[in-house]
């Protein structure tokens, strides 16, 4: 009986073409989800520019411009949430993915109010779109596992430029009391620092604490320069931006365990420049810038 069963199995396997049994055992490959990439991000940035160009309309008051900017920030954030959720970006609900675009839109809206010429306003909106694309491209590439050394430069450059612009816009406003100015400087430095520190550590509490200490140091410096030094707003904004860059750069590399002598020299040079600019203002005793 066993011999008959073995002969039957042999005859059944002989009738099958070679490799068919192996093909049947293989499972069908599961289709990979389609990721959204630079085309979607470029379209989102272009729509932000198109909407932002309407901010300079003569029919809009400054209050309406701020309302439109808030709406644009919400729409852009929702578009980025959809992008990262579709791509299954790790920790896509973290705020560091959405901080830079919001700060960039706020800075562009403020420039649209101050710019007397429509060409300056158009340049500010186009710059806003380019900065949104560049800053979000870093998060997009990182979420796909395609991070490159140039991406860190893009992240630092977009964050620093938005920070410098917002510091200047806050400090040059004569209608705001100093309490609101210093509070706004603290919030901008806190959010910008949090974005940078989240790239260095996955511990959100540590990133928030580092950002808080950085923002506190920058705000204390702003209070001292505005209160005791006779300097122009753009001069103070440059010093504060350099101080923020030096502090957060050293902290990021310390958290990333990549602090070296070259890096200490690079960021220490910015700290020396800040001290030199403050000393220069003290010696001259007159507004600079």
Image (cartoon, rainbow, N blue to C red):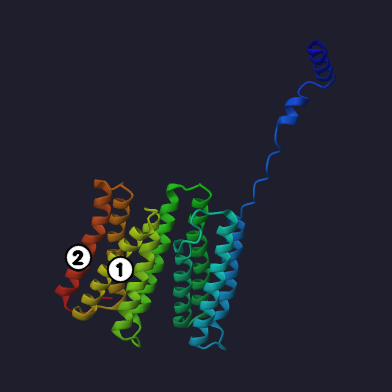
- Residue 240 spot, x, y in % from top left: 29, 69
- Which quadrant of the rendered structure holds the N terminus? top right
- Which quadrant of the rendered structure holds the C terminus? bottom left
Q: Is residue 18 placed above or below 213 in the rendered structure?
A: above
Query: Secondary structure beneath disc 2?
Result: helix
**Which mark is on residue 215?**
1
Q: Report, in whole angstroms, how far the alpha carbon at label 2 lies from the one at label 1.
A: 18 Å
The answer to which of 74 and 238 lies nearer the viewer is 74
What residue is shown with label 2? 275
The answer to which of 145 and 68 lies nearer the viewer is 145
- Residue 260 spot, x, y in % from top left: 26, 46
Instruction: Give the left or right position of residue 218, taking residue 95 as reference.
Output: left
The residue at the point 38 percent across, 67 percent down is 191
Going from N to C along the chain, the mark reached first, 2 or 1, is: 1
Which mark is in front, 2 or 1? Answer: 1
Query: Secondary structure beneath disc 1?
Result: helix
Instruction: Give the left or right position of residue 75, taking residue 268 as reference.
Output: right
Instruction: Give the left or right position of residue 23, taking residue 144 as reference.
Output: right
Total numbered labels placed on residues in the image: 2
The residue at the point 31 percent across, 72 percent down is 237
Q: How crowded is mark 1: few (under 14 residues within 10 Å), some or many (20 or more)?
A: many
Q: Which residue lies furthest to the left in this view?
A: 283
Residue 50, located in which quarter of the rendered image?
bottom right
Residue 186, located in which quarter of the rendered image?
bottom left
- Residue 66 spot, x, y in % from top left: 49, 82
Q: Residues within 10 Å of mark 2 (few under 14, many from 20)?
A: few
The answer to which of 110 and 141 lies nearer the viewer is 141
Q: Which residue lies furthest to the top in this view?
A: 3
The residue at the point 53 percent across, 49 percent down is 144
């Amino acid at each position: 009986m066993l011999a008959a069963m073995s002969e039957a199995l042999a005859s059944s396997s002989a009738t099958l073409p070679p490799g068919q049994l192996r093909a049947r055992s293989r499972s069908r490959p599961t289709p990979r989800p389609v990721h959204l990439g630079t085309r979607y991000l470029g379209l989102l940035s272009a729509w932000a520019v198109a909407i932002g160009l309407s901010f300079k309309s003569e029919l809009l008051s400054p209050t309406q411009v701020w309302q439109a900017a808030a709406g644009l920030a919400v729409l852009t954030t929702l578009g980025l949430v959809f992008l990262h959720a579709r791509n299954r970006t790790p920790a896509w609900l973290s705020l560091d993915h959405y901080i830079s675009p919001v700060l960039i839109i706020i800075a562009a809206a403020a420039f649209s109010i101050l710019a007397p010429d429509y060409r300056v306003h158009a340049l500010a909106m186009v710059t806003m779109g380019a900065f949104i694309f560049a800053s979000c491209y870093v998060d997009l590439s990182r979420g796909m596992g395609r991070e490159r050394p140039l991406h860190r430069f893009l992240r630092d450059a977009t964050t620093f430029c938005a920070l410098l612009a917002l510091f200047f816009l806050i400090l040059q406003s004569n209608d705001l009391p100093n309490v609101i100015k210093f509070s706004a400087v603290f919030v901008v430095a806190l959010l910008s620092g949090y974005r940078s520190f989240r790239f260095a550590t996955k511990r959100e509490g540590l990133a928030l604490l580092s950002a808080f200490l950085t923002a506190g140091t920058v705000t204390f410096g702003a209070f001292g320069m505005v209160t005791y030094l006779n300097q122009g707003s753009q001069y103070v904004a440059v010093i504060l931006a350099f101080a923020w860059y030096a502090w957060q750069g050293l902290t990021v590399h310390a958290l990333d365990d990549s602090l070296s002598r070259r890096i200490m020299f690079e960021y220490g040079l910015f700290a020396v420049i800040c001290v030199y600019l403050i000393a220069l203002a003290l010696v001259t005793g007159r507004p600079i810038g």
